Image: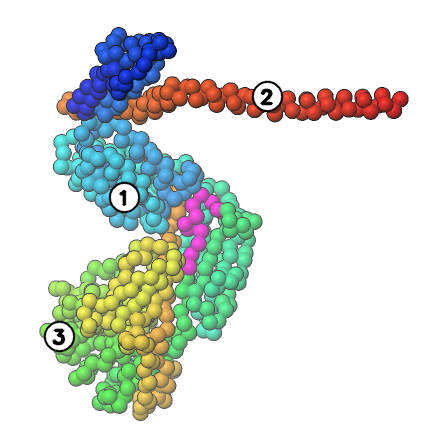
Amino acid sequence: MGLLAPLALLGLLFVPAILAMYLLRLRRKETIVASTLLWQGLVADVEANAPWQRLRRSLLLLVQLLLAVLLVFLAARPVVERPAGLARDLVLVVDVSASMAATDVRPNRLAAAKEAAIAALAELPAGGTVSVIAAGRTARIVANATTDLGRVRAAIAGLEPAPVRGDLGDALRLAAALAARSGDAEILVATDAAGPVPDVRLDVPVRVLPVGRGRDNQAIAALAVRSTPSGVGRSLFVSVVNTDLEAAERRLVVSAEGIPIEARDVFLDPQTRTEIVVDDLPEGIGSVEVALLGRDGDAGRPADDLALDDRAWAVVPPVRLRRILLVSEGDPYLETALSYLPGTELYGIRPADYGPATHPELFDLVIFESTLPATLPSRPILAIAPPRSSPLGEVVGTLSEPGIGRLDPGEPLLRYVDLSTVHIAEAKRLVLPDWARVVVPGPEGAPLLYAGSRLGLPTAVLAFEPRRSDLPLQVAFPILVANLAGELMGGGEPPSEPLSPGDPVELTIPEGATGLRIERPDGSVHELVPGTPEARTVTYAATELLGVYTVRPIAAGSSAASPTPTTGPSPTPTAGGSPGTGGSSPSPVPADPTAPGRFAVDLLDVGESTIAPGSPASLEALGRRTGGAGTAPDRPPARDEIWPWLALLALLGLLVEWIVYERDGLARLRRSVASRLERVTAGPAVRGGAAADRSGTSGGGHR
């Protein structure tokens, strides 16, 4: 046993001081009296207060001396040393992903992981440092190389589960970088090990604190609102997955604006998906909520071990007719693909007739094919084979029979688009502008299709005319046109597809507004303003809460007035226009700049909803093998402080001292209580005897 603060032993000097208080005589005032005959009984007391006399037996003195010694050793912080079970520098990784909110371990897995991590700190060597990493969507350091275990415990206690897919690989790589600063380091991971094993290799020993034991979970895996084939109504598509090994029965409840509109009992086979369609959603609703409840429909009890994935939300896009203006000499392939877009009207005009009188501000999308005006309209633009350089991009030449480079499978514009057999006769050689991303790469770094946000306006540029390729003859063409139109015409509104928690979303500031006010699902409000007065978009990243977010413009001054558009001459449809091409001027139906927008954030992650615990050995195998814990020859021992026990003894000593000092008063109190109890218990007996006497006397008189 050792002492962490040996200088505190100087407090033992108080022991002689306590003894001196008992040895020294009490000083009294001298007074002249006539006789001391009646004071003979006070001689013993006077002798007892003589200075430096022999100590007499005193229980109070003994208790005070023991209490002083205990307090001194308590300040000296005695410790018991033993071999350390952890490395000198510990990097603690705590999994805070959605699966750690599972309640198969009470109260949940994360609480059990935090308790195990705090208990493991007892194996840390003396003077060891601890770093704490929260492994959520990204790795986050919450404590960095500190020896203050109180701070470490507070950092661990402050961790909360997040409704996100965890990335243990990212956290382990960060932990290895922190551990590389020391020659005696170790990574300790508190996790359920659910999900795939990270593809990393670490030159640091890894140990796992496993939590979790169950796998009972059913989750909403997909949610979408789609128009019916007739285009009149809306349908809700829900996909529910059962990740358990046993079948389950659940009740699916669909609510619109908080009012239940549909309830179904569904039977879920093990390890399978079940698709559910709810037709004819009510008109005028902005969002729907889907809840997966228990078989009896009780929302107060969890249906399974993970509640985060039992609810999902979807935004219902407003029904609004979209208008597209095509400025072209005539391309039947392009016109046909555009005219069959649902919910849109196509208007055509020749390049020679385009001008301010066309009123491009009345259209949701303007397409220029092989032409560009001197002044670009302040509307979303799709430029096809631009003939010259412009703010849309620099044209530096021509490409003959260009090949298509490697495509990004995660590109949203290429969803369900197969370009593997497309051949292009000729294309413009373009230089990618700063505001755009490459969608379809071409030869020598020249993009064939790029898109982005230019001055807050969705914009895309296609380097070749569709009729100069065999793309219009393939199924990919109408799908690509639909994807392009959807992104360009929907860029000014919040996304209708649910976002994943933590995903940033780019929001457009409407005309007449200075910023945006976002109301989160918990009722909190964030206000965003652009970085520069010219910017018309802001990026919002605080999307870690599940639910529906409401976006409202911040009007300049007191209010933002809706613009009053004017009608102009009718754009003339292109010669040979396909069905659906309008022949009259579009009626002005501008978007209300004060109308709120919405977007939803859902978990919708089957991998994270699969809560079956993984193998701790698989994670430990990612690290370097060691000969066992505590084998480092220069590793200091672990120390267990015993001050809590000494503090308890000190409190008991204070209690004993008080009892000894107040023993006379306590004795009187005990006698008083005993006498009261005797009177209370004797009262009924006395009253009963008196009543019997009165009864006997009365009876005798009667006789």
- Amino acid of disc 3: Val
Do residues under tags 2 and 1 come within 8 Å of each other at their CB atoms? no
Check residue 308 for magenta coloring.
Answer: yes
Judged left or right of residue 72, residue 546 is: right
Tag count: 3
**Residue at 20 percent of width and 29 percent of height:** 87
What is the CA distance from the residue labelled 3 to the residue labelled 2? 110 Å
What is the CA distance from the residue labelled 2 to the residue labelled 1? 66 Å
Q: Which mark is residue 678?
A: 2
**Mark 3 neighbour density, 10 Å: few (under 14) some (14–19) many (20 or more):** some
Do residues under tags 3 and 1 come within 8 Å of each other at their CB atoms? no
**Residue at 70 percent of width and 25 percent of height:** 687
| Residue interval drawn in magenta | 302-313
- Amino acid of disc 1: Ala
Of callouts 2 and 1, which one flags the residue occurring earlier in the amino acid sequence?
1
Residue 571: x, y in percent?
31, 88
Q: Of helix, strand and loop, which one carries label 2?
A: helix
Residue 92: x, y in percent?
25, 37
Residue 483: x, y in percent?
31, 68
Which is more foreground, mark 3 or mark 2? 2
Q: Mainly helix, strand or loop, the magenta region?
A: loop
Residue with the mark numbered 1: 134
Q: Nearer the viewer, residue 422 or 18?
A: 18
